[in-house]
Image (cartoon, rainbow, N blue to C red):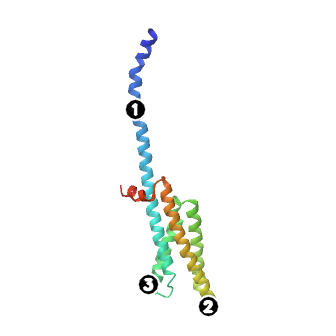
Amino acid sequence: MAEKNHILNYAPLVIALIPIFVGLYEYKVNNEREFGKNFLTQQSVVYDELLGDLGSISTSISNPDDSISQANYTQAKYNFNQLYYGKLNLYQSATIEKLTDSLYNLINSYDSIKTIKRKSSQREVLEDLVDKVQDKVYKLSVECKKSLKNTYNIAAEDTTTIIRK
């Protein structure tokens, strides 16, 4: 009988501790969810900037004789370099890193070949580089979409819903 009373003495303490532990658990889960939402939002913004700049680059190199395209190219390349050496490293996956490295090298190759006086053989090389850049930009956009989807195992259509909240 004394043992029962001894256990009953601790019952109020145990009952009081349960909501405290539940509250701490919920607080931890909510903080992780908020961090994930913020990370996903920032990742989406960086990918949007990246793909916008690369889209400008890929369309500008298709028309190298247009002065407006070349001005857009110069600005987009500058922005791409800022992302490449800056905040892109915070959010990119290994696949995206390989694709951006490859694009960085292709764009620099394009600039090197473009500065040499144009001959018919160089024109073919430039056209090949343009095709490669555009293909890689497309592949990168697909990988960015996958990366956003995989960030928190969400469906692609749910990505915009989370970002808007």
Q: Secondary structure at mark 3?
A: helix
Residue type at mark 1: give it.
Answer: Ile
| Crowding at mark 1 (Cα within 10 Å: few <14, some 14-19, many 20+) | few
| Crowding at mark 3 (Cα within 10 Å: few <14, some 14-19, many 20+) | few
Foreground pick, 158 / 60:
158
Does label 3 or label 2 sit earlier along the sequence?
3
Residue type at mark 3: give it.
Answer: Ile
**Where residue 163 sits: x, y (%)?**
39, 57
**Where residue 60 sits: x, y (%)?**
48, 80
Q: Secondary structure at mark 1?
A: helix
Label placed on residue 68 = 3
Q: Locate the N terminus and report the quarter of the image it occupies.
A: top left
Label placed on residue 93 = none
Q: Are marks 1 and 3 in contact (CB under 8 Å)?
A: no
* Residue position for label 2: 120
Compared with 151, 54 (above or below) is below
Compared with 136, 9 (above or below) is above
Q: Is residue 86 visible?
A: no
Tell which residue pokes out farthest to the left in this image.
165
| Crowding at mark 2 (Cα within 10 Å: few <14, some 14-19, many 20+) | few
* Residue position for label 1: 20
**Where residue 46 sits: x, y (%)?**
46, 63
Does label 1 or label 2 sit earlier along the sequence?
1
